[in-house]
Image (cartoon, rainbow, N blue to C red):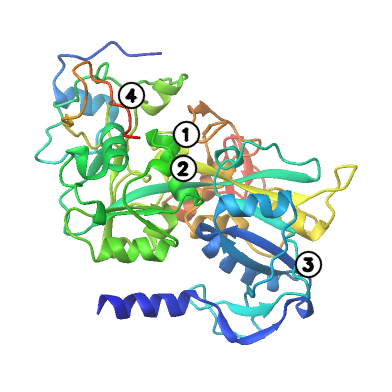
């Protein structure tokens, strides 16, 4: 039964190959190679951009590990496999983010991605500096969780416990996580593993457990696991599976209490990510190619990146970008109040140039901010709310 | 800046000061703060990394009384196996 459920989930997740068309015949294609944690973002943004009246764009993408995506754009490795894209409303009015993507065939000889994504600091994957021809943009924050089956009685894990469980496996003597066949982890090129690795001081290649290539496999492992099971996931993957598993609160080194990414186990506000109480998060990094003057080689690629990063774009898009970022469980940079400069590094206070906290909270919780149409008694009117700056 | 240490203050006072929403597990009472943590206060105007992660908050806190057996007597962690 569990196997059947996994196969159904796989069938929905995989692109429909029966509709494979040449990718370069799609309207304004922008080719991307992104982390598999970004699939939901690609789906929602891809749908919105197909219908972006001022500048329609087709996101044509593959998902892969962050540490595979970085060299793909640093050294210009062509994508030769079939890619995915999202149908326009005209092509499929009934399509939703829960639906499968469509498949298209790459141009002859493959296509170098216009945009590559790492769901963590590039330096966590490679010591190589980006070439002068690659421009990096910091996008929304991505949180990562440790999750357990609903049959587990556990509610929290500490830095010390996580270090021992994943660094020593069955020898950790940390109950109940003593069965290495019940430790569901990721392969060493994946941001989920590397982000946790940096936070618990266990290098990626030293982790004990069952190394899985995709998040759906970790989900399946946790769902079917025993009380000794534990797995690592992107928070947005966990958010989509809350009914069948529990995220653990995490107590970082030197922290007095453990915290969920959200203000409680049942909320979805990412409050503790935004203010620094939950430490296991990474900025998503978005890369495109620039010429000798630093100008983007493909302006439409930079348009997409600027949208994801929350920057003002020209022409203005016809949809709410913060809505999309919030809907896929990411935190827009404009709602963050802490930052860091390397993977797992210490947090520092952060003030974005233009706050969107009120707007973000209105989408994921309730906002106590005053609403506005043009001006505010205090603060700045932005996105319909009086933001503090 | 930093509040005075609350080594001996009742958990209820701590909860009020930090806005604890009371999600403490029954088998891990709030007063059981791990040995090794400096104190149980929170910071009302955080600046340093340690103050930021221990800032006062209205978010749910989970206190876990954890003493892994492999911890060294001085509270440090053993080296990872090769």
Could you tell me which residue is drawn at 72 percent across and 40 percent down? A130
Q: Earlier in the sequence, mark 1 or mark 4?
A: 4
Q: Earlier in the sequence, mark 2 or mark 4?
A: 2
Chain identity of mark 1 = A
Residue A264 vs B7, above or below: the answer is: below
**Is there a contact, CB below 8 Å, between mark 2 and mark 1?**
yes
User: Can you tell which mark lies on residue A55?
Assistant: 3
Mark 1 vs mark 4: in front:
1
- Determine crowd level at label 3: few under 14, some 14-19, many 20+ residues with C-alpha closer than 10 A: some
Quadrant in the picture for residue A56: bottom right
Chain identity of mark 4 = A
Give the labeled residue for mark 4: A254
Q: Disc 3 and disc 2: Cα gap in Å?
A: 35 Å
User: Can you tell which mark lies on residue A331?
Assistant: none
- Determine crowd level at label 2: few under 14, some 14-19, many 20+ residues with C-alpha closer than 10 A: many
Mark 2 vs mark 4: in front:
2
Q: Secondary structure at mark 2?
A: helix
Q: Are the residues under badges 1 and 4 in a single subunit?
A: yes
């Amino acid at each position: 039964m569990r196997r059947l459920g996994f196969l159904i989930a796989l069938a929905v997740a995989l692109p429909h190959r029966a509709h494979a068309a040449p990718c370069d015949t799609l309207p304004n294609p922008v080719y991307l190679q992104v982390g598999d944690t970004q699939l939901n973002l690609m789906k929602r943004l891809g749908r919105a951009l197909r219908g972006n009246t001022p500048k329609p764009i087709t996101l044509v993408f593959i998902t892969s590990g962050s540490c595979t995506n970085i060299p793909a754009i640093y050294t210009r490795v062509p994508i030769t496999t079939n890619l995915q894209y999202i149908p326009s409303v005209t092509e499929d009015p009934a399509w939703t983010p829960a639906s499968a993507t469509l498949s298209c065939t790459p141009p002859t000889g493959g296509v170098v991605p216009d945009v590559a994504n790492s769901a963590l600091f590039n330096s966590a994957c490679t010591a190589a500096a980006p070439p002068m021809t690659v421009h990096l943009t910091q996008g929304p924050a991505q949180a990562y969780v440790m999750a357990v089956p609903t049959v587990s009685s556990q509610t929290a894990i500490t830095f010390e416990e996580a270090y021992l469980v994943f660094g020593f496996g069955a020898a950790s003597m940390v109950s109940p996580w003593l069965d290495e066949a019940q430790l569901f982890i990721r392969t060493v090129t994946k941001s989920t593993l590397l982000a946790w690795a940096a936070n618990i001081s266990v290098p990626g290649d030293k982790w004990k457990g069952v190394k899985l290539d995709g998040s759906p496999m970790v989900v399946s492992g946790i769902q079917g696991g025993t009380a000794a099971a534990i797995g690592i996931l992107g928070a947005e993957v966990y958010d989509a599976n809350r009914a069948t598993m529990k995220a653990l609160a995490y107590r970082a080194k030197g922290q007095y209490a453990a915290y969920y990414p959200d203000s409680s186990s049942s909320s979805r506000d990412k409050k503790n990510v935004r203010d620094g109480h939950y430490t296991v998060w990474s900025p998503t990094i978005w890369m495109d190619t620039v010429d000798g003057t630093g100008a983007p080689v493909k302006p439409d690629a930079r348009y997409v990146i600027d949208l994801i990063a929350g920057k003002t774009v020209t022409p203005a898009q016809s949809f709410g970008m913060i809505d999309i970022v919030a809907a896929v469980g990411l935190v827009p940079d404009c709602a963050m109040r802490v930052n860091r400069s390397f993977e797992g590094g210490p947090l520092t206070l952060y003030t974005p140039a233009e706050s969107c906290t009120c707007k973000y909270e209105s989408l994921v919780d309730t906002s106590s901010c005053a609403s506005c149409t043009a001006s505010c008694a205090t603060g700045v009117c932005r996105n319909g709310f009086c933001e503090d700056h | 800046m930093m509040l005075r240490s609350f080594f001996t203050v009742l958990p209820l006072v701590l909860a009020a000061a930090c806005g604890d929403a009371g999600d403490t597990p029954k088998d891990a009472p709030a007063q059981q703060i791990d040995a090794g943590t400096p104190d149980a206060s929170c910071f009302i105007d955080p600046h340093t990394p340690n103050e930021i992660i221990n800032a006062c908050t209205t978010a749910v806190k989970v206190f876990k009384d954890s003493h892994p057996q492999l911890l060294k007597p001085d509270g440090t962690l053993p080296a990872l196996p090769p």
